[in-house]
Image: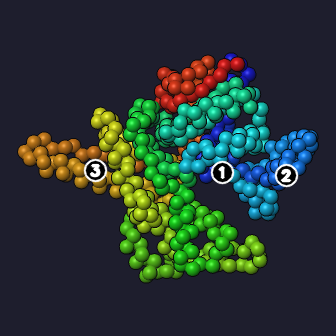
Amino acid sequence: MDAASSRPAVVIDNGTGFTKMGFAGNVEPCFIIPTVVAVNDSFVNNQTRRSSTSSNNWLAQHSAGVMADLDFYIGEEAMLRSRSSNTYNLSYPISHGQVDNWDTMERFWQQCIFNYLRCDPEDHYFLLTESPLTAPENREYTGEIMFETFNVPGLYIAVQPVLALAAGYTTSKCEMTGVVVDVGDGATHVVPVADGYVIGSSIKSIPLSGKDVTLFVQQLMRERGEHVPPEDSLEIARKVKEMYCYTCSDIVKEYNKHDREPSKYIKQWRGIKPKTGAPYSCDIGYERFLGPEIFFNPEIYSSDFTTTLPSVIDKCIQSAPIDTRRALYKNVVLSGGSTMFKDFNRRLQRDLKKIVDARILLSDARLVGEVKTQPVEVNVVSHPIQRFAVWFGGSVLASTPEFYAVRSRINPYFHALELSKFCSPSVFRYT
């Protein structure tokens, strides 16, 4: 066993909104930070200006380029820098689950490894995650950066929903067949998994995510005329979503509750305006339950997409092989911070059960005098760690001896037999 195998692997789950990172074997990630980079554009502008005025001043151009590569921040510190200084501009390297800017992504990984985790990348194996339907080229770019820039001894790239499914098991019951409903900040995927293998042809993706809930809450508060500072409205909407939003069983009944007892259901948000320092307060009312409702009644948010999340899950399972459907209905696993709303799992299970029961009744009506269809068990699994279930699944995977046993494999489409429960494309280099 080499030196890197004796140290815990580094597990980094890069999401559109937040990145979770830590070491294998831990129950929770060491750091959860926004996936954002603040770059000082003044060095780039000075470099461009100098190159246009004096082409022989190569030393000044080189110095400006070096400073531009060094002067950047990530996470919460990046957001603070952009607010306090006009020279720093925010850059989001991941959009809708896919990496858009690889230079910014490389800078982000650099700070994650050296500034947050404070480890030598040459001494640790790495496990990174990717969203479903990611192009193979993205995996190649990731491997190129990790091997050539950071010189890591081994790299494993795992599909996020499979890790989320692995995170939900217990020692007495390990089910690697199920449907993962991964609702992140930038993308929502419904992924069926059979015996640890992703059924790629049945993957569904919908254009509704946690960021849409935030924007909808912001829109509702703005239309109602709440006195919220414009520069902080999006951040306040995000905090309102995380602290006060919940899922209701019926919109009309919930409206009546708020109208009958406003003092019980309407909350107060208090803050200080960043520019003037004056205190302000605003009401938080209907958006508490209307925010998460866009997954069950998307037409209240946008007319572009009107298919509900339970219907998407049902279509996903119905497109899977017929012998796996009952097992898929029985194990619908939630993953992502936007599934943490109160009673989200109960509402999803109820609506999905209605769709399935209606289909069975229709089928039985056609089969008059013949054998009736057996009822289908629908179960939506919710667990306390579903916010960072993907990272925890990666931590479990990277803690197994098999994680190091297949490090000599180079084929990016190789499915290790020993790791069939955590099946995903992998990239390794043996040094």
Q: Secondary structure at mark 2?
A: helix
Amino acid type at circle 2 is Arg
Side of 396 where 363 appears, left or right: left
For the rendered model, the colour scheme is rainbow
Real-space CA distance between mark 1 and mark 2, rounded to the nearest whole angstrom: 26 Å
* Sequence-earlier tag: 2 or 3: 2
Between marks 2 and 3 in the image, the one whose residue lies nearer the viewer: 2
* Sequence-earlier tag: 3 or 1: 1
As displayed, is residue 72 above or below residue 252?
A: above
Q: Decide which of 399, 113 is in the foreground and name it.
A: 113
Residue located 85% across and 42% down the image: 66
Mark 1 vs 2: CB contact within 8 A = no
Residue located 54% across and 70% down the image: 219
Mark 2 vs 3: CB contact within 8 A = no
- Whole-percent x and y of residue 227? 63, 79
Residue position for label 1: 92
Residue located 45% across and 47% down the image: 205
As displayed, is residue 349 above or below residue 327?
A: below
Residue position for label 2: 49
- Marker count (numbered): 3
Q: Decide which of 362, 301 is in the foreground and name it.
A: 301
Amino acid type at circle 1 is Tyr
- Whole-percent x and y of residue 292? 47, 62
* Sequence-earlier tag: 1 or 2: 2
